[in-house]
Each structure stands twice: as structure tokens, then as C-alpha cells.
Image (cartoon, grey):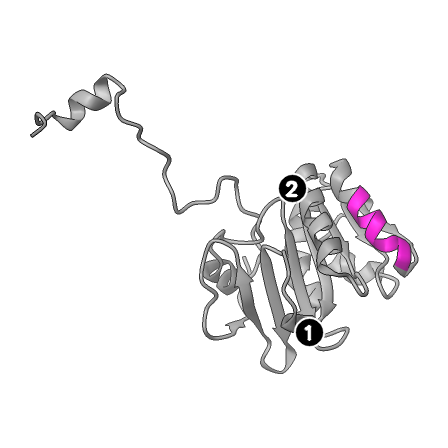
Amino acid sequence: MGAVVALDGLLATRRVWRGQATGMPASAPEPTGHAALDDALPTGGWPEHALSEVLLPADGVGELAMVWPTLARLTRAGQRVVLVAPPYRPHAPAWYSAGLDLRQVQVIEATARDALWATEQCLRSAAAKAVLCWPQKADDRALRRLATAAADGQCLAIAFRSLREAANPSPAALRLAIEPTERAVRVLKCRGGTPPTKPVAMTGTH
């Protein structure tokens, strides 16, 4: 039978590997600005340097209000935000009223065919802190390229897609589905944790 050795002695002589603390994200979170949603997510907000998806039953159901608090905070800090091929021309007064510094907002017009390429290049360039896109018919391979580009460029990537895509697998670290009739959002997937069983009310902000 082996000899009993005091643990503090092993630690002092560096003969035991301590490992790393777990349970907290490696990098600082990007709060969504919605208190209840941040509390429900394992990172306390958007997963940083990763791809997130916001799935919509239709356009104009509050998807912009979901991201405005984050974008306002970033732009007021002097960080650039890029919109790639939005389906509608952004209404500047509404974005300004939401608290964004419009000088830090850039809109890139692109065809549906070129939008994914443009999004990937923006993410990988590290020229922006957040990139929003509305990809059409993006397959798993295309989404994985966006996820990799977000990690490489240390950028927040948010893709707005149809709720029909919820039935398909996705490499996104976070998948949210808006439920406009309930003013709530369902967390379909959140890397590093278990999605809450009930929709999260989108009422409080911080």
C-alpha cells in the first residue's frame, strides 16, 4: 500500500495538476440588455466571439428591439457594428432613439448570393465588434464558416433566420426563437448550459 502524502505538500512541490476552474466563460460576456434573458443564459448574455441565431416567425416581430441594447452599448463605446444585406432599409431615427451612435453603424448592401461571403469577411477582418446578417438558404457548412470567422475575428455574429430553421441542426452557440404574441423568447440552444423549459419574458432591461 502506498504511503499517505499530505495534499498541501504535493501542491507545494507542484506534483499535482490543479486544472482550471470551470463553470464560468473564458471571456467576458456580451449582455443582451434584457435582464431576464441574461439571467437565463449560461454566459450572462450573447456568447462572445461566436455565432448566435434569432429565429423569426415573420419580419418585424421585435427582433431589432432584442439586439438594440447590445448595439447601443457597443456603439457608444466607439465599437463598429455592421449590418450585411438587411431585408429593409434601417430607419435611422428609430436606431438613434434606441441609443445607438449611428456614426459607428455601417450597412453593406449585397445580393443574397454575396451576403454570406460579405458577412464572413466582415467577421474575420476584426474591423467590427458585431456583425448582423440575414442569410438566405444558408446550409450547415455556410453557418460553420460564419461561426469560425466570428471566433477568428473575435466578433459577435447574429444571424436572423426563419423560425422554420429551428427543425434543422445549427453550429450556432445560441439559438433564440421570438414569440411575439407573448412578448417572450424561447431559448432553443445555449452552449454551456441547459435551455430553460419556459419562454423568457422580454420585459426588463438593464
Residue drawn 70% across the image and 59% down it = 140
Q: Nearer the viewer, residue 73 or 62?
A: 62
Q: Which residue is mark 1?
A: 163
- The answer to whether any part of residue 68 appears in the image is yes
Dot 1 crowding, Cα within 10 Å, few <14, some 14–19, many 20+: some
Q: Main secondary structure of the magenta part?
A: helix
Residues 135 and 97: in front is 135
Where residue 109 appears, x then y in whole percent?
Answer: 91, 54
Q: What is the span of residues highlighted in magenta in the rendered image? A: 113-121
How crowded pointer 2 is (Cα within 10 Å; few <14, some 14-19, many 20+) is rated as some
Quadrant of the frame with the C terminus: bottom right
* Image quadrant containing the N terminus: top left
Taking 178 as reference, is 20 above or below it? above
Chain-order first, disc 2 or disc 1: 2
In the current view of this chain or complex, which residue is farthest to the bottom? Answer: 181
Q: Is residue 206 left or right of residue 124?
A: left
Q: Which residue is mark 2?
A: 151
